[in-house]
Amino acid sequence: MQKHTLAERVAQIAPFQVMAVLARAKYLASLGEDVIHLEVGEPDFTAVEAVAKAGVAAIQSGNTGYTAATGLPELKQAISDDYLARYDVAVSPERIIVTPGASGALLLMASLMANPGEEVLMPDPCYPCNRHFLIQTGANARLIETRPDDGFEMELSALAGHWNENTSGLWLASPSNPTGAVLSKAYLTEAWEKVQALGGHLLVDEIYQGLVYDGEDFSALSIAEDIFVINSFSKYFAMTGWRLGWIVVPEWAIEGATKLAQNLFISAPTVSQYAAVRAFQPDVLAECESRRQILNGRRLILLKGLKDIGLPVVAPAQGAFYVYVDVSSVTQDAMSWCLALLETEKVALTPGADFGIKDAHKYVRFAYTCDEGKLKQALVRIARFIAS
């Protein structure tokens, strides 16, 4: 019998630990248990009704064929107009590559800027798929240890010491998953200046842009045109299953990014693109702003509730919809603690090991993607679990 062997890169990609939690949570829910989901980074809102209707209209009008590989021209223009209106940044539509989700943008970025054998620096903790996209190109991520006392920000004064002849660039995120921290313009400006001096590239993942409650909501594109920026319709616009994102590239990278988009994706989902054009109209943006205020209310409830039950929040939860919590006072194994909490009190959380290496067993991520009533109930259940 022929022996089948998977490519070696597959073994280098770690599965999400949260998937074990999610699978068990779904099973318990199927048995009729009242499970409170605070584990998955997906808003409980769906696309604004006007956006969904625009998608239906596209289907009814027969607008379902391929678009240009880099995206529907009117969508690229709408994104460009939005950067100018909301962030006072002029971005030509030609620099915008529309992708199948931000995941497609990350794959394109890894393929565009990382050679086999090279490495990209990232803070520990960070979104795990970033590392895995690099593996697909034969490159690697090197996680740089950060400290909760600094809000898990990478120490930029030490950046040159981490850099070597194989380092290609630095990838950051703001607002951050898993911490919810927002990087300041001064921090990103310094990061860009140092990366530029070292001869590398800088990527800023802005997929939670717009979901900022404390701190400045801006784009890294306001700092320099040569910074790469990734964004998505999944979070602020609550269009997760529509699978639509984009990457903004410098002028000198347009041709290469276009070739990759043509070969990797053909095009992003067409119906989603027509729907997304509608997302930038004032009525939809007003609804998204209303939802941001709802999320902020949930954030404040969670921050107070965690303080009351003695679980310290270890990063400034200024944006996205996450709070990163130190559970070392109640367990030395966050994964086991999460599973036990789920079995006992039917609250699902994400263990820190999904996001990093250093002291990951100490941390748990809360996603405030359910209503205030469920959040308060979850806090009561967690307090009871700790007391028992």
Image: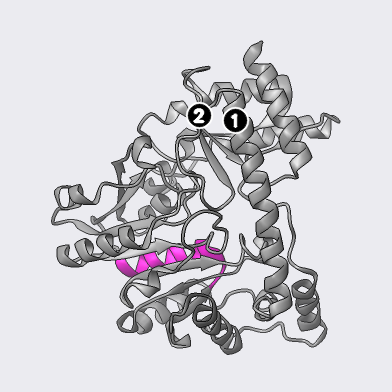
What range is drawn magenta here?
99-113
Foreground residue among 290 and 207: 290
Q: Are marks 2 and 1 in contact (CB under 8 Å)?
A: yes
Report the front residue among 312 and 174: 312
The magenta stretch spans residue 337: no
Residue that numbered label 1 is attached to? 306
Which residue sits at x=27%, y=66%? 201
Q: Residue at x 38, y 74 (%)?
A: 222
Instruction: Report the amino acid beneath label 1.
Output: Leu
In the rendered image of this protein, does residue 384 appear above or below residue 118?
above
Horizontal side, residue 250 vs residue 316: left or right: left
Tell me: 322 left or right of 153.
right
Q: Which residue is mark 2?
A: 312
Residue 322 location (% of width, % of height): 56, 45
Residue 346 marker:
none
Q: Secondary structure at mark 2?
A: loop
**Place of residue 199 in the rendered image (x, y in percent of width and height, measured from the top left):** 17, 66
Residue at image coords 58%, 37%:
18
Q: Characterize the local packing of mark 1: few (<14), some (14-19) or many (20 or more) Cα atoms within 10 angstroms.
A: some
Residue 318: image location, x then y, percent: 51, 50
